[in-house]
Image (cartoon, helix red, strand yellow):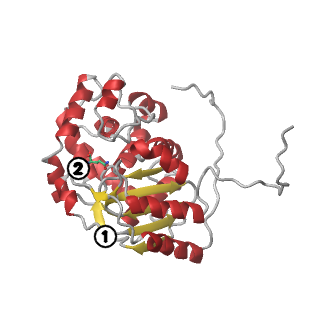
Amino acid sequence: MLDVNIDGVEQAVSTGSLPEWGRVDDLVVAAHERNSTCQDGSVADYIPELAQADPELFGVCVVDVDGGEHAAGDAAAEFSIQSISKAFVYALVCEEFGHQAIADLVGVNNTGLAFNSVIAIELNDGHPMNPMVNAGALATTALMRGLTAADQWEAIKSGLSSFAGRELELDQVVYRSEAATNTRNRAIAGLLESYGRIKRPPLEVVDVYTKQCSLRVSARDLAVMAATLADGGVNPVTGVRVVSAQVCRDTLAVLAANGLYERSGEWLFEIGLPGKSGVAGGLITIAPGKAGIGTFSPRLDQAGNSVRGQQATAYLSRVLGLNIFASAAKQPKDNTLNVD
Ligand code: GLN
């Protein structure tokens, strides 16, 4: 890993604020309305139960770091969290093991390949590369606190519930459907074991991972979870600290690089914020120090990212002034370029 030589350096944060309340409300409604007729993409069907989703459902929710909520459409409809769980399990494991250990063990670099790629593991000598693709997520879940797989599952369920500020439940139907068909994830876990990257029984690790992916959430839950990452690790609705501010910073960096799989570069270019998608159609986006955004719409692009979720978020990022790369000149200057 890079030696950044910052021992003893005090950390300051860069924040800002959202526009006034009524305007955020209007813009969330507009984000929903202007994208509601889009039919692009298709519902995931490689997990049989996900193919049953109603493709018309569409919810948008913004929760600010004061706990205020702005919602439009089907923001209360529930669905399985899927890969978005990876972000929060990573944060919980990072809280336990710290910045460096997880960076060394699991990695933080983009694979440039699909979320369930086996080639990515082989190309990198068995290294899982990052916790947001299946290989790295399985390696991360394997590190979760707990003596048995059942203990690990309980710790994950209760940790993700703290992020959401309510008790999340397992979707038994989705869990059974994925457990019966997840041969590829079993192969990935076996491969990781062969490279010494997971120390627990691989099938148990896959089972805990499948359960974490099957937790039921709504777009509103996702917005609260995202807002907790935007608020230095404190859930702004319950006031409970879930993880440290350092863990949030690390998690957001990993999401910025990897949250939308092989489309992460395009996402950052258009939206300019860390985000994470899941194949059931959920999407979280984090505006550090300002707010969390949760969207739900089941039709996905080729990489497995919700189409309308990305469109609604792109709109909100622009109109709410959230893109972390956007700046304006502090002093008005004349428009001629000075090339001296
Ligand atoms: N449970 C799913 C899987 O492992 C999650 C994938 C996703 O949301 N991209 O295939």
Q: Which mark is residue 211?
A: 2
In the rendered view, does 313 fall on the left or right side of 141? right
Residue shown at 54% from the left, 72% from the top: 27
Residue shown at 82% from the left, 46% from the top: 337
Counting residues from the start of the chain, the first of labels 1 and 2 encountered is 1
Relative to 83, residue 145 above or below: above
In the image, residue 282 lies at what x, y percent?
36, 58
In the rendered view, does 177 fall on the left or right side of 293? left
In the image, residue 301 lies at what x, y percent?
36, 53
Report the amino acid beneath label 1. Answer: Glu
In the image, residue 231 lies at what x, y percent?
53, 56
Q: Which mark is residue 56?
A: 1
Observer-nearest of 210 and 143: 210
Q: Can residue 91 be seen in the rendering of this structure?
A: no
Relative to 124, residue 323 above or below: below
Residue 217: image quadrant is bottom left
In the rendered view, does 12 fall on the left or right side of 40? right
In terms of secondary structure, where does tag 1 sit?
Answer: loop
Report the amino acid beneath label 2. Answer: Lys
